[in-house]
Image (cartoon, rainbow, N blue to C red):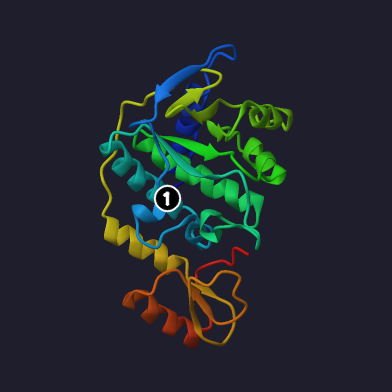
Amino acid sequence: MLRSLTTRTAFFTLLVCFILSTSLNTSVAMSKSKLVCEQPLESFLKDVSLLTLGSLGNLGLAFDVGRYVGNVVRSMGYYYYVIGPLDTLSQDDPDHFYRVHKSPFITAEVYEYLSQGLGSSGVIAVLDGRGKIDAGLIGALNNRKLTLPTIVEDRSKADLLVNLGFNTSFILVQDGGYTFLNGAPKILYWSSAMLDADELRRKVLSNAIIYLSPGEIQVRKTFARSGVVVFSDEPFVLELAKKVLESRSAPGRVPW
């Protein structure tokens, strides 16, 4: 297990270096079609969102999710996948399920696993730097050397991120396509074996069940304070939730 983790980390370090080998004085425009996929995780694995991953007791399952999504995305003809925002979870977020966790450190860890999984399937992970950003998350990503390509709304946002110490390649969405502000797109030419979607989904949803206190089963209720929180209303999840209420123990962690 340790050897596998070390190998994976070394591979990912080389991958990031390859991705970021860009020239700061060049910009390249590419067609929007079949380059960067921005579909949410739930469109590939029902009920599996970023918040689901942030609630996992075993965060390493995010690697398998990335690997699976990478295979699907690659089969669709994409080479990049937007994994999530440069922001952490808070109550005023417009979409709680498009956030990982309130902690910048756990968010960065999930992003690292997702990125490694995607990379193993030949897909490059991209961060979403549009809108609100969390400086603490940027610091946590830098500590992990996880300076992934990042979509921004304009050049001033790219400059802001650089001033915050986040030096990476930046991507603009404009004129029906993607413009790489400081380099050319990279393409990976490998893939990995496809995982069983149903088995993976069951593992993730089961491991993300959260026990808060005696009470009711709360289905996809963010910022709940009592009962058991689950991220799906499927029978197998609800049956597990009933057992959790009896045992008062669950594998998931509270992300808010």
Q: Which amino acid does the dot numbered 1 rest on?
A: Pro
Residue 249 in view of the camera: no
Q: Is residue 162 above or below residue 238?
A: above
Locate residue 230 relative to residue 167 in the image: left or right.
Answer: left
- What residue is shown at x 35% (from left), y 41% (from top)? 70
Between 29 and 195, the one nearer to me in the picture: 29
Q: Is residue 15 above or below residue 212?
A: above
In the rendered image, residue 33, in percent from the top left (x then y), is placed at: 34, 31
Between 9 and 41, the one nearer to me in the picture: 41
In the rendered image, residue 237, in percent from the top left (x then y), is placed at: 38, 74
Q: Is residue 195 above or below residue 82?
A: below
Picture quadrant of residue 163: top right
Between 219 and 10, the one nearer to me in the picture: 219
Disc 1 on helix, strand or loop? Answer: loop
> Which residue is tagged 1?
40
Residue 59 in view of the camera: yes
